[in-house]
Structure formats: structure tokens, C-alpha cells
């Protein structure tokens, strides 16, 4: 199995485990979210240890092993991105599996209830017609998003997980995603890998590259958008 085939299979299987756990109905809300995190993480970590034993792993739900910093190949995974949405019975949650090579998410898969998208098949769709749309966090939309929305005349669209928001740009449902104020590498590695493969603009809000497998895993801001909007949005971020 190639790396991208492995990423896709692991993300899809983890998603199926999450769906089965939720459909069982025994747990709901926060207990369901906690169980989903644990089940998906246990599967991904064990599967990667079996399939790629020499690679490093960084997971949101696993104690960090500093030895990953010495490795060129490191899997950065979020077993359940959008735990709150998953526990609430919503569909805007995702499983992230990315293989970062020298800090770049060159191989990635993001699984959602509507399918799996990978760096091999990012499936970029044309932008929707009409007023531009900018997707933001449901619970804590950053102030910079309003400045960016004004710069391109966009409406703000609230959505759940980071993976769901990035894939909304890939799918053409929205035109941009701006975030500032707190995220970690596992929140964006796989979605950014897919977005880059689809030809989207993906940077920090100051225009610097998104780099993974760092000692400090905090990666608090990003800008994902269609290339033709990048200059205006970066200018708006700078002025904000």
C-alpha cells in the first residue's frame, strides 16, 4: 500500500468506527465525544505502528514522543476533529491523517460523512456563484474574519471542525477560511495537505508557510482560500 492509500484507508476506517459508535446510541453528548476520541485514536496509533513502524506519530490524543523531531517522516493525526459536533449528532466533524515529510503535509486524507478526500484526489470544485462566502468557527469566530469578509464583500458562514471548514473551500461551498486565536498541528495538517494538492492558497495569516512536526505544536492561525482572493485577504489580515 502506498502512503496515500494507507492514509485514506485509515481515515475511512476510523470514520466508520466513529459512525458505528454513534449509531449504537448508548452514549451521547460529551461522553460520546470522549469515547469517539479514544476509539479512533487507539485504532490509528496501533495501525500506524503496524504499517509504518519506523515513522514518527503526533496525535492530539496521544502523549507526545519527542523522538519524532529526529524523523523525516511523521504522521500527524487528529482522530476526531470536531468532537463537539460529533457528540451533538452533526456531520461537520472529520478524521485527519497526514504524513508530513520534512515538515510539509505532502500525503494526507480527510474523512467526513460524505467521503474521503486525499492529496491524490483533492477534487477541487468550481467556486459557487454569487456573493463570496468566508467560513469561520461556530463558537469563536476571530475578529480578523470580519475584516477579511469586508475586504472581499463576503458573508460569514459558521461551521464546526477545522477539517470541515477547509474542505468546504475545496468543495467550492465557500471561498475562504480564516482562523486566528488557537489551533494545533493536528487541527490543520491533513486538511492543508488536501487543500494544497487542490491548488488552494494555504499560509499563516501573515503569509508565512505552514510548517509541521515542530517542537512547539501550537499553530494558531491560518488562511485557506481560492488563489485569486489571497492578496486581498492577506492585506486585510495585516491591517487587522
Image (cartoon, rainbow, N blue to C red):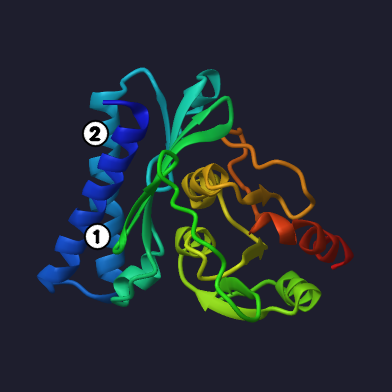
Q: Nearer the viewer, mark 1 or mark 2?
A: 2
Q: Quadrant of the N terminus?
A: top left
SS assignment at label 2: helix
Residue at horizontal 57 percent and vertical 44 percent from the top: 196
Q: Residues within 10 Å of mark 1 (few under 14, many from 20)?
A: some
**Residue 168 appears in the figure:** yes
SS assignment at label 1: helix
Give coordinates of residue 191: x percent, y percent. 49, 50
The residue wearing badge 1 is 35
Give coordinates of residue 97: x percent, y percent. 39, 42
Q: Nearer the viewer, residue 53 or 204?
A: 204
Residue at horizontal 63 percent and vertical 48 percent from the top: 219
Q: Is residue 64 above or below residue 234?
A: above
Give coordinates of residue 35: x percent, y percent. 24, 60
Q: Is residue 96 above or below residue 103?
A: below
How many numbered tags mark residues here?
Answer: 2
Which quarter of the figure has residue 240?
Answer: bottom right
Instruction: Tell which residue pokes out farthest to the right in this image.
Output: 239
| 142 relative position to 92: left or right | right
| 218 relative position to 117: left or right | right
Residue at horizontal 45 percent and vertical 40 percent from the top: 119
User: First in sequence: mark 1 or mark 2?
Assistant: 1
Q: What label sits on residue 47 in the rendered view?
A: 2
Q: Are marks 1 and 2 in contact (CB under 8 Å)?
A: no
**Residue 223 appears in the figure:** no
Cα distance in 3D space between marks 1 and 2: 18 Å
Residue at horizontal 44 percent and vertical 52 percent from the top: 123
| 189 relative position to 216: left or right | left
Q: Is residue 210 above or below residue 173?
A: above
Q: Residues within 10 Å of mark 2 (few under 14, many from 20)?
A: some
Give coordinates of residue 73: x percent, y percent. 47, 23
Amino acid at each position: 500500500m502506498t502512503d496515500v492509500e494507507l492514509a485514506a484507508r485509515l481515515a475511512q476506517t476510523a470514520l466508520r468506527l466513529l459512525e458505528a459508535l454513534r449509531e449504537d446510541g448508548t452514549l451521547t453528548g460529551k461522553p460520546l465525544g470522549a469515547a469517539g476520541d479514544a476509539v479512533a485514536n487507539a485504532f490509528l496509533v496501533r495501525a500506524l505502528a503496524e504499517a509504518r513502524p519506523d515513522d514518527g506519530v503526533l496525535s492530539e490524543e496521544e502523549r507526545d514522543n519527542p523522538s519524532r523531531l529526529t524523523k523525516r517522516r511523521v504522521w500527524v493525526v487528529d482522530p476526531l476533529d470536531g468532537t463537539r459536533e460529533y457528540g451533538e449528532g452533526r456531520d461537520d466533524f472529520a478524521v485527519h491523517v497526514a504524513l508530513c515529510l520534512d515538515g510539509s503535509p505532502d500525503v494526507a486524507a480527510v474523512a467526513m460523512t460524505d467521503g474521503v478526500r486525499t492529496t491524490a484526489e483533492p477534487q477541487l470544485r468550481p467556486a459557487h456563484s454569487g456573493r463570496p462566502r468566508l467560513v469561520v468557527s461556530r463558537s469563536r469566530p476571530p475578529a480578523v474574519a470580519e475584516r477579511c469578509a469586508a475586504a472581499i464583500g463576503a458573508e460569514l458562514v459558521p461551521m464546526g471542525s477545522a477539517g470541515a471548514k477547509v474542505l468546504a473551500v475545496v468543495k467550492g461551498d465557500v471561498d475562504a477560511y480564516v482562523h486566528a486565536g488557537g489551533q494545533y498541528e493536528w487541527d490543520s495538517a491533513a486538511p492543508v495537505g488536501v487543500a494544497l494538492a487542490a491548488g488552494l492558497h494555504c499560509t499563516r495569516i501573515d503569509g508565512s508557510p505552514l510548517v509541521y512536526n515542530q517542537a512547539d505544536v501550537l499553530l494558531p492561525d491560518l488562511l485557506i482560500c481560492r488563489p485569486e482572493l489571497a492578496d486581498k485577504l492577506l492585506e486585510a489580515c495585516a491591517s487587522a
